[in-house]
Image (cartoon, grey):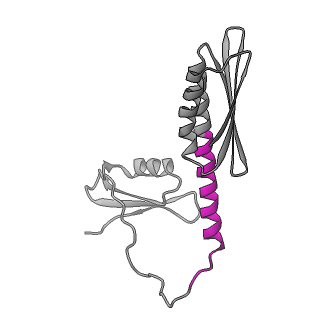
Amino acid sequence: MKIKIIGKELKITDAINDYVEKKLDRIDKYFDDAEADVTLRTEKNEQIAEITVYAKGETYRAVTEDKDMYASIDKDIDILEGQIRKFKTKRDKMMKESSIKTMEPIDRGIQEITDEIIKTSYYEIKPITPEDAVLKLKEKPTHNFLVFINVETGKVNAIHKLKDGKNYGLVEPEA
């Protein structure tokens, strides 16, 4: 990584220079060829670090201020690393989606699965009244039915929404 460090109203010591280079190694691992411009300055009691990274046509920038220059540099590196990870994740996701969208379905004579149980759901079954079952079913608008133990009969029943969307049907065993 090519690094250019500039000090405004601040002398860049070897210690600061080494610290910046060491910290920018965290950013360098994301890119093969990148450049960084680092501007360090003081304003009143604040130490301000401004780091701009240019890589693969993108620009990442962070500016922070702190009482300590080293802390300010650390904050910048954390911000830059977050920006780079976020951008890479977003780009990878877009690349994956676009490649899936452009794929043509391949018909190799594979038959569609029919008349098979392809999903199993497990839930706790509790003894309740049919009226309470209707209320529970109303709480879950995406569900079309609810299986429960009828308190009055002690048998397994099912309550389901009718096609009119306003009423419910009750399924009870005969025996």
At x 60% / y 18%, what residue is drawn? 69
Residue with the most extreme bottom position: 109
Residue 91 within the segment the image draws in magenta = yes
Quarter of the figure with the N terminus: top right
User: What segment is highlighted magenta in the picture?
Assistant: 83-106
Residue with the most extreme top position: 44
Q: Give residue 156's quadrant in the image.
A: bottom left
The vertical placement of 43 against 78, above or below, is above
**Residue 55, image x, y percentages:** 68, 47
Q: Is the magenta stretch mostly helix, strand or loop?
A: helix
Frontmost residue, 18 versus 102: 18
**Residue 88, image x, y percentages:** 60, 50
At x 58% / y 45%, what residue is drawn? 85
Residue with the most extreme front position: 14
Q: Give residue 114's quadrant in the image.
A: bottom left
Residue 21 within the segment the image draws in magenta = no
**Residue 142, image x, y percentages:** 52, 56
Quarter of the figure with the C terminus: bottom left
Q: Give residue 42's quadrant in the image.
A: top right
Frontmost residue, 13 versus 152: 13
Frontmost residue, 118 versus 164: 118
Frontmost residue, 69 versus 63: 69
Is 46 on the left or on the right of 167, as rendered? Answer: right
The vertical placement of 129 against 119, above or below, is above
